[in-house]
């Protein structure tokens, strides 16, 4: 009987000791503002007000804060991941699986409604802004295209995606077809992608850039095909991609290699967000040719130091932006390219600056289609829609 009581006391006092220890650690441990592993900002300690107390948001925000700043949080996430893989024998954790040295995110099944929605969006833009111009489109495969089937993971039906999108767009190889398909990825392999991230590696997509240029009829303006000798290779070490934090498993970091030349060094980027005014002029934009317009370099390495970016991949043209205009004073022509894009294009566009005086990057995840005409002149420009399969399968994110 006494032994039973002692066990109860040990259990109770042990639990109390654990709670008190956690509370003390929560108070004394330094508070981080960002999670480098998860590449996101952590919740801030909420301030108690009558309003948030009444609508119960204070308790919700407090819970988020406590979860984000729980002691040894990253270590516990890793233990959970090991438990899922090694004990429960799960093949993925948080929809992330690791195989052949690569982390990838499950993407299935094919959302045919999304494919049709994207086609409708593309056709609407063409009819509104460039009805008489040849319009190209290309699809960048995600990492599942190379990894899923052979390793026993489900994936979308890529062939069906291509066929359905082509049917919806009325795509054809004929010069008078409204949309023309551009095959730029036939030579891609899994090794052309970062191990810990979703994106392709710039130094590995010179052939992609050359294929795009060939389809657009400007390949003769490029001084490379697949050889990077015309570029200087610059390295950024210890790149932990988006899948590293989500998988919560130890992986070797990637190295970002970005390619520079006299052409890229001379080019500059104007972005809508950078030139959006505040204060008494809030809501107005300093346009590219107006006095006071802010222009930045193609590779914005300062983002590695200023704490404003959580992703080293943002060095490519500054990362996510609703609308960017790149001007290349050393281009071999006066031609212009309008590129409806996602983040994959950030590392591709600099490789085309030798051929185009101006490249306009439009990301419909961040700008409404109706606003584009305020800033972009489509007359005489080459037009290309380039999206990765995740965007095609989740086109509801496009405005």
Image (cartoon, rainbow, N blue to C red):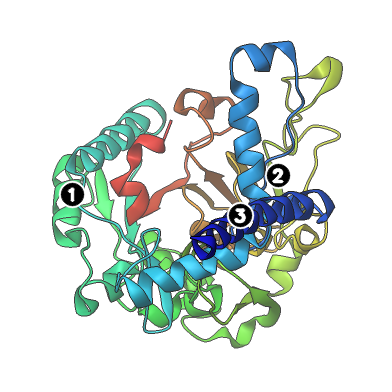
150 left or right, relative to 78:
left
Tell me the SS state at disc 1.
Answer: helix
Mark 1: few, some, or many residues within 10 Å (few <14, many ≥20)? some
Which residue does the numbered mark 3 point to in the structure image?
15
Image point 85% across, 15% down: which residue? 280
Q: Position of residue 40 (x, y in %)?
A: 63, 51
Instruction: Specify the quadrant that holds the C terminus.
Output: top left
Tell me the SS state at disc 3.
Answer: helix
Q: Report the Cα–Cα distance between label 1 and label 3.
A: 62 Å
Task: State the image quarter where residue 37 is shown.
Answer: bottom right
Question: Which tag, 1 or 3, sits closer to the chain's start?
Answer: 3
* Callout in the foreground (3, 2): 3
Image point 45% across, 74% down: which residue? 193
Q: Position of residue 70 (x, y in %)?
A: 66, 52
Q: Nearer the viewer, residue 187 or 237?
A: 237
Mark 3: few, some, or many residues within 10 Å (few <14, many ≥20)? few
Q: Position of residue 188 (x, y in %)?
A: 35, 77
Question: Which tag, 2 or 1, sits closer to the chain's start?
Answer: 1
Q: Position of residue 269 (x, y in %)?
A: 70, 50
Task: State whether residue 352 appears in this view.
Answer: no
Q: Report the Cα–Cα distance between label 3 and label 2.
A: 57 Å
Which residue does the numbered mark 2 point to in the structure image?
270
Report how many numbered discs are placed on residues in the image: 3
Verify CB contact (< 8 Å) between mark 2 and mark 1.
Answer: no
Image height of 268 relative to 74, above or below: above
Which residue does the numbered mark 1 point to in the structure image?
166
Tell me the SS state at disc 2.
Answer: strand
111 left or right, relative to 133:
left
Q: Which mark is residue 383?
A: none
Image height of 176 relative to 256, above or below: above
**Given the current orientation, which residue lies at the most extreme front position?**
1
């Amino acid at each position: 009987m006494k032994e039973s009581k002692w066990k109860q006391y040990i259990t109770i006092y042990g639990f109390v000791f654990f709670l008190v220890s956690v509370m003390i650690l929560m108070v004394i441990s330094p508070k981080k503002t960002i999670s480098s592993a998860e590449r996101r900002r952590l919740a801030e300690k909420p301030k108690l007000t009558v309003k948030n107390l009444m609508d119960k948001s204070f308790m919700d925000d407090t819970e988020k804060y406590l979860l984000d700043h729980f002691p040894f949080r990253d270590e516990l996430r890793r233990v959970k991941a090991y438990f899922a893989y090694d004990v429960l024998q799960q093949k993925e954790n948080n929809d992330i699986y690791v195989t052949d040295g690569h982390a990838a995110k499950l993407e299935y099944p094919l959302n045919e409604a999304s494919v049709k929605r994207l086609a409708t969006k593309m056709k609407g833009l063409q009819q509104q802004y460039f009805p008489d111009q040849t319009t190209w489109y290309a699809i960048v495969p995600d990492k599942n295209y190379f990894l899923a089937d052979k390793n026993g993971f489900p994936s979308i039906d890529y062939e069906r995606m291509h066929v359905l999108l082509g049917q919806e767009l009325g795509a054809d190889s004929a010069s008078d077809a409204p949309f023309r398909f551009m095959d730029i990825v036939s030579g891609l392999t899994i090794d052309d992608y970062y191990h810990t991230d979703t994106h392709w590696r710039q130094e590995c997509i010179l052939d992609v850039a050359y294929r795009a240029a060939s389809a657009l009829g400007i390949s003769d303006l490029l001084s490379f095909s697949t050889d990077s000798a015309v570029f200087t290779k610059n390295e950024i070490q210890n790149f932990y991609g988006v899948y590293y934090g989500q998988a919560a498993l130890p992986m070797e970091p990637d190295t970002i290699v970005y390619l520079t030349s006299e052409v890229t060094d001379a080019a500059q980027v104007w972005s809508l967000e950078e030139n959006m005014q505040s204060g008494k002029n809030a809501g107005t934009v300093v346009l590219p040719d107006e006095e006071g317009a802010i222009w930045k370099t193609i590779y914005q390495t300062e983002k590695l130091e200023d704490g404003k970016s959580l992703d080293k991949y943002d060095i490519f043209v500054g990362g996510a932006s609703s609308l960017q205009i790149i001007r290349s004073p050393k281009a071999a022509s006066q031609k212009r390219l309008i590129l409806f894009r996602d983040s994959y294009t950030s590392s591709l566009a600099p490789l085309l600056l030798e051929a185009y005086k101006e490249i306009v990057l439009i990301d419909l995840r961040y700008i409404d289609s109706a606003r584009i005409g305020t800033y972009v002149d489509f007359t005489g420009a080459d037009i290309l829609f380039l999206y990765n399969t995740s965007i095609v399968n989740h086109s509801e994110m496009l405005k």
